[in-house]
Image: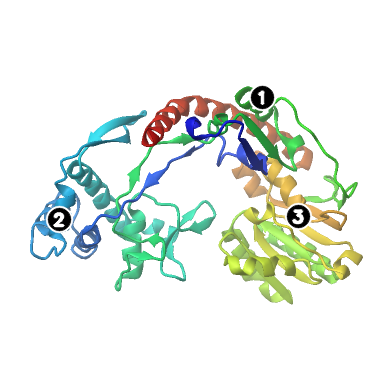
Amino acid sequence: PKAQVQENSVLLMDEVDVFFTKEYYGSNYCPISIPVVPGLCAIQKEIWYLVNNLGMVDVEVKEQIQIFISSPRFVHKATFDEFLNQPTSYELLIFNGENHVMKQFTNKSLFYKELELMIKDATSAASRIWTHSNYKLNDQGAIIYRYKERFVTWHFNGYKNVFNYFRLKQHDYKAEVGVYPNYGYLNIKCGSLSYAMLPKAYPLILGVTGTLTALNQYEKAAIDRLYNINRSSIMPSFFGCSNLAFNPEENFTHLATKPLWMGKIFTQAHAAVGANRAAIIFFYDDKLLEEFRAQYCGQFDRLQVLTENTNEDKHEHLISEAGVAKTVTLATRGMGRGVDYKSSVAVEKNGGVHVIQSFFSLDVKEETQIRGRTARKDNRGSYELIVLDEHLKTQQLIEAGQQEVTYAGLDVARTKIALKENKDIEASIEKNTKDHMTTLAYLQSFFK
């Protein structure tokens, strides 16, 4: 809230271009509170037993839970009743289908509202098999959820985390692992904050990015209109000109079939390691990466995988090894931003690290970042794009049957898509502003 921002404070934003991606600018952050309630552990385990083992649904489950919390089997009855029968009422933010509004609750009305959501999510965890791959237990035994392209402990998808924990663990449940709760909590939503509106609380914003010149007209206009930033400084590299070898006409290849596409990627990577260089291949997601790895893992002497889901303890070692001669690193697109890949003296002598991007970025800033993983500082390096026609059609960059596909043509197509998306984002920000202000006022009330 603006009242909590100190006068003359400065908001520092590193890699500020990331802020203008779909995942942030134009999107919302929905804060939650997850209070642990005495006795709720037993109630949630009972819900799972009724749904998963006995096949009960909806009202039937609710009736059985009401019987359970009144029975001697519920050993936490005294403390839970004390919570449930608290007479004090309070306001919470709820979504009414259009906007977030304030509504009065007591502990009892809140519990029974949340109970219905628990039953719904337990049924989902038991029956929606196609969602099961989005949940797993980490090495410590905490439930983790696939958020975008990686598994995290901090994203709570309603109560689905709770019941997928029961599904995966099956027995010997632990309500919490370290600071990470597995079950026994309420998931209280606290409104919706617009990422785009958050910086407006600060009187001064300083943003840094290596792709400032890649901002499109809407992004530049937003910086001026929303944040009143109308000056920018483009600073040359301390190391002078780049030593990157990339020609959009010569270093761009599109293939009609997946076998040809994978074969070309292999050929180019094999040529790089054959020249005593290192190669880093960036894939759109871990599924495509794994397909390539499964087919060609036996063809390289030094092959390593680096994704958002790679154990963080291994990151530094894998990053330093990526620049060792004859090493091929398979990475997902998320590892193409802000990662400082090193290169050995032997690799530098032979042309530096060769980067292959196996998909076409709809956001040119992402491509610029991936390209920048080689020829860093005053090092040498090369980059090429090897893309599959099927992926380009899915992205609506080319039409079915289109024969002539060039880098320049794809660049024009993605610019048109980006401009349309920016118009949609602008409308989304306007729509979400009311919820943002309501949420700020609600959160600010805690500091009065």
Splitting the image into 4 quarters, where does residue 272 fall?
A: bottom right
Residue identifier under label 2: 65
C-alpha separation, residue under disc 1 versus residue under disc 2: 55 Å
Mark before the other along the chain sequence, 1 or 2: 2
Q: Nearer the viewer, residue 311 or 218?
A: 311
Vertical arrangement, residue 401 with respect to residue 286, above or below: above
Residue identifier under label 1: 224
Mark before the other along the chain sequence, 3 or 1: 1
Q: Secondary structure at mark 3?
A: loop
- At x 41%, y 66%, the residue is 178
> Callout 2: few (<14), some (14-19), or many (20+) C-alpha neighbours within 10 Å?
some
Vertical arrangement, residue 437 with respect to residue 405, above or below: above
Vertical arrangement, residue 305 with respect to residue 9, above or below: below
C-alpha separation, residue under disc 3 versus residue under disc 1: 30 Å
Confirm or deny contact between disc 1 and disc 2 (CB under 8 A). no
> Callout 1: few (<14), some (14-19), or many (20+) C-alpha neighbours within 10 Å?
few
Residue identifier under label 3: 373
Quarter that holds the C terminus: top left
Q: Is residue 143 left or right of residue 403?
A: left
Vertical arrangement, residue 188 with respect to residue 434, above or below: below
